[in-house]
Amino acid sequence: MEAVAPAINEASPHPARVLLVCPEARGGLAQHVITLLADLCRSNYAVGVACDPEGPVARAVGDRNLPVCGIAISSRGGPPRAALAAVQVARAGSDLRAQIVHTHSFAAGIVGALAMPLVPTGRMVATVHNYPPDADGMQPHSRQHRWAMARTCRRASRIITVSEALRRDLIAVRPEVADKCVTIPNGVDTHASPARQPDETRKDLALPVDAPLVGMLARLAPQKGIADFIRAARTAADGFPSAHFVLAGEGPLKEEALALRRELALQDRLHLLGEVDCPRDLTAALDMLVVASTSEGSSLAAMEAMSLGKPVVATSVGGVPEVVADAETGILVEPGDPGALASAIEELLASPDRARDLGERGRRRAAAHFDVQQMLQRTKVVYADLLREEIETGGDRP
């Protein structure tokens, strides 16, 4: 696995002034930004944040006495909303005298690209966490999305993708970014212990303590395969009467998930928990994790499960196969196939010894490839590389 392109050099000992820009984020993207933010503060970087004023990133910033620009960045906002957000980001970047403006997501990327001409001290780093909304692969359907992608790729001095699949697909569409696009996988704290014991977590969430527990932690959004997981749970529940299933997350498909649970008579077997306070505790309480996505840049949830020694059943999409090694740390199936998903779940429910072996292999793989310290160090190396480039070129931008 190529984690970072060879051109990246050693990190500079001189911390930078960094403005982090992120959308109305929940789940893995928000966790990624919060983790990066905390490490930059520990490393004495001067950090500012432009984010949703009500979201989890803003809450994480709240106790750190950092500059915060409250803005709403969304892929649904259109050009006028992006332009307004860009003015706010430019002001925040100028006030901070930001040397690095680091955007997260396509929506934040176009806002950052529009803002950069008004941030004379800064260079832009754009992290791509997933595929564009409503697109097949990296090719957006709308003219507006294509324009936004072109502008972001041109303005960004470095582009970080969270998987090699994303990097390959982006370069296929925008070949000119090959020399400035690097892969840095997401990371989790592979040494952290859950805050609570699994039995305690199950009791707190009103889950059965002794039953086999299969779970999915995901935003309830179309690309996450919510209906596929629920249908797979129905099939597996018939084959394993003692097993229970968990779906944790919020999102636009919540009502559809509730309706499908009623339709399939799963009220007593499928527990819809909403957004949980400590996802790691819940993952530690599961017997296996399911990732049913139809589109996924990577999978932080799978990394978390593997770090806790849990086997993973996942769809073979995007960067997921770079995380879950098929037949070694879990089972991969084709997306959009509830039957295949159910068969894989049943296979591991029927063989606890094999499930434990896959989980232990996953623990070792997570420690070797997906520890959060690797992600943090590699990101700071990208910053340092840009600072040196700024000095060598006299501030000329791409």
Image (cartoon, rainbow, N blue to C red):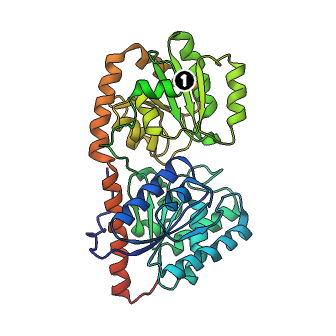
Q: Position of residue 241 (x, y in %)?
A: 53, 9
Q: Would you identify the image quadrant in which residue 374 lies?
A: bottom left
Residue at 51% in and 52% down? 29
Q: Position of residue 279 (x, y in %)?
A: 48, 39
Q: Pick out the residue farthest to the bottom.
A: 394
Amino acid type shown at disc 1 = Ala
For disc 1, the marked residue is 206
Q: Is the residue 342 above or below the residue 124 in the image?
A: above
Mark 1 Cα within 10 Å, few/some/many (few <14, many 20+)?
few
Residue at 70% in and 25% down? 260
Q: Position of residue 115 (x, y in %)?
A: 59, 77
Residue 287 seen in this snapshot:
no
Query: Quick check: 107 left or right of 31?
Result: right
Report helix, strand or loop for mark 1. Answer: loop
Query: Quick check: 59 left or right of 35?
Result: right
Q: Position of residue 261 (x, y in %)?
A: 67, 23
Q: Is the residue 6 above or below the residue 387 in the image?
A: above
